[in-house]
Amino acid sequence: MCERFVIPDPTEVEREFRVADAWWKFTACFNVAPGRPTPIVRLYEGRSEGVMLRWGLVPDWAEGDERKGCARQGRVEDLTHCPLLSGAWARGRRCILPVRGFYAWRLTAQRYRQPYYVRLAHRPVFGVAALWDRTVLEDDDDVIETCAIVTVPANALICELDAPRSRMPAILSRDDYEAWLGAPPAEAAALLRTCAPEAMLAHAVSPRVNSLKYDDPALTAPVTPYGEDVLAAPRWGQHAAA
């Protein structure tokens, strides 16, 4: 799964995506949790734009009330029939979430949830497939826009870290950004593939990431894992800091 992730510096994001209209305003964040505004890339009237949306998709039928329905993540297998996601999928409301990496938690034999930071080996900034939706409140014409990450079956690395959940974000190839945003649904769905484990790196990080009061680069720094039942020597490349 993906409970927390890291937003890169705006300069890095704009270098990676080169949107036509950059309406977003944000700074690097090292501990993004659901409910927080996050930058996304989408198409509007044929032009790419960068805007801020709240993480946690509230479908339009929920009338802006997340108690009626809210999805932080959506399985690729559920896009066409899950009530929380199917409306956004049918309307072609696809977007890309720019990230530097994300966190996963490994349950040790001591029942301790050791956090790990996961990133790509050769791409400092990458795009994760996501959906967005919009609600216009009739009383005050307020517009609420939200998004959800699309997940795919986990690769071997993520399964080692988070086996009970066995899901991971759908990481897009740079060459697939345009198609994900604007291609027909069948073509877009074909882009949602599990990233190869050898393309990823992971290392243990401080449990400070468990608290939202912490948000600094040190959250992604490698630490010695707690306890004896920890991830063994790197199988998918060196566990170096980002």
Image: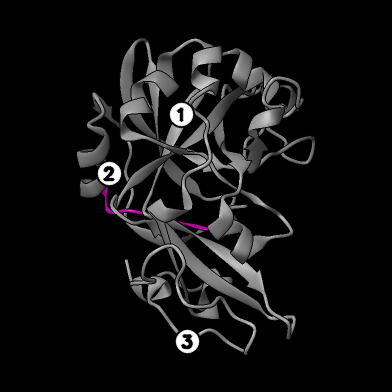
Give the residue drawn at x 54%, y 68%.
212
**95 up-or-down from 125: above or below:** above
Report if the CB atoms under discs 2 and 1 are less than 8 Å apart.
no
The amino acid type, in three-letter code, at marker 3 is Thr
The image position of residue 25, as x and y in percent, is 32, 43
Give the label, 1 or 3, closer to the camera.
Answer: 3
Report if the CB atoms under discs 2 and 3 are less than 8 Å apart.
no
Helix, strand or loop for disc 1: strand
Tag of residue 228:
none
The image position of residue 169, as x and y in percent, is 54, 44
Residue closest to the eye, 95 or 153: 153
Q: Residues within 10 Å of mark 1 (few under 14, many from 20)?
A: many
**What residue is disc 3 on?**
224
Quarter of the rendering containing residue 86: top right
**What residue is disc 1 on?**
95
Q: Which residues are magenta?
A: 4-10
The CA span between labels 2 and 1 is: 14 Å
Say whether disc 2 or disc 3 marks the residue closer to the N-terminus: 2
Is residue 15 visible in the rendered structure shown here? yes
Is residue 143 visible in the rendered structure shown here? no
The amino acid type, in three-letter code, at marker 2 is Val
Give the residue drawn at x 75%, y 27%.
82
The CA span between labels 2 and 3 is: 30 Å
Say whether disc 1 or disc 3 marks the residue closer to the N-terminus: 1
Say whether disc 2 or disc 1 marks the residue closer to the N-terminus: 2
Q: Is residue 129 magenta?
A: no
**What residue is disc 2 on?**
13
